[in-house]
Amino acid sequence: MIEICGVLIHAKPGFSEEVQKQLLTMSGVEIHEATDDNRLVVTVERIGKASLADSLSAFSATPNVLSATLIYEHAEEI
């Protein structure tokens, strides 16, 4: 199974770059946009048994992340 998710992440003011570096260490994560108000437009691609809940939990547990909101999700068998 492949799962592609779009997530809006809000970082603490002044920590956007640090949060971006941390997110990019996670498997399947790509950052598409970083706004001036510390919001990050992120996609994550998961293949296999890894779940969307795992990704959202990891984003939320990242230091200096205020919120991680699921915007889009698509899954299909490959």
Image (tube, helix red, strand yellow):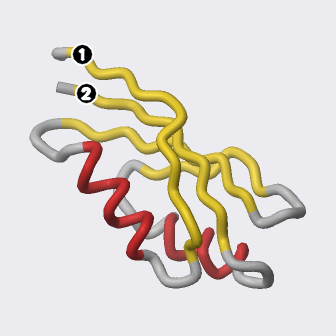
SS at circle 1 = strand
Number of numbered discs on residues: 2
Q: CA distance from mark 1 to mark 2?
A: 6 Å
Q: Quadrant of residue 51?
A: top left
Q: Where residue 25 sits: x, y (%)?
A: 44, 69
Q: Quadrant of residue 73?
A: top left
Q: Residues within 10 Å of mark 2 (few under 14, many from 20)?
A: some
- The residue identified by callout 2 is 2
Where the C terminus falls, by quadrant? top left
Question: Residue placed at 52% from the left, 48% from the top?
Answer: 69
- The residue identified by callout 1 is 76
Horizontal placement of 58 versus 39: left or right?
Answer: left
- Amino acid type for the residue under numbered disc 2: Ile
- Amino acid type for the residue under numbered disc 1: Glu
Horizontal placement of 1 versus 36: left or right?
Answer: left
Q: Where residue 33 sits: x, y (%)?
A: 74, 48
Question: Residue placed at 73% from the left, 58% from the top?
Answer: 39
Question: Residue placed at 45% from the left, 76% from the top?
Answer: 62
Q: Residues within 10 Å of mark 1 (few under 14, many from 20)?
A: few
Q: Where residue 63 sits: x, y (%)?
A: 50, 83
Horizontal placement of 67 versus 2: left or right?
Answer: right
Judge whether 63 appears above or below 4 on screen: below
Q: Where residue 17 sits: x, y (%)?
A: 71, 76
Judge whether 58 appears above or below 17 on screen: above
Where the N terminus falls, by quadrant? top left
Disc 1 to disc 2: CB gap under 8 Å = yes
Judge whether 10 appears above or below 19 on screen: above
Question: Residue placed at 48% from the left, 41% from the top?
Answer: 70
SS at circle 2 = strand
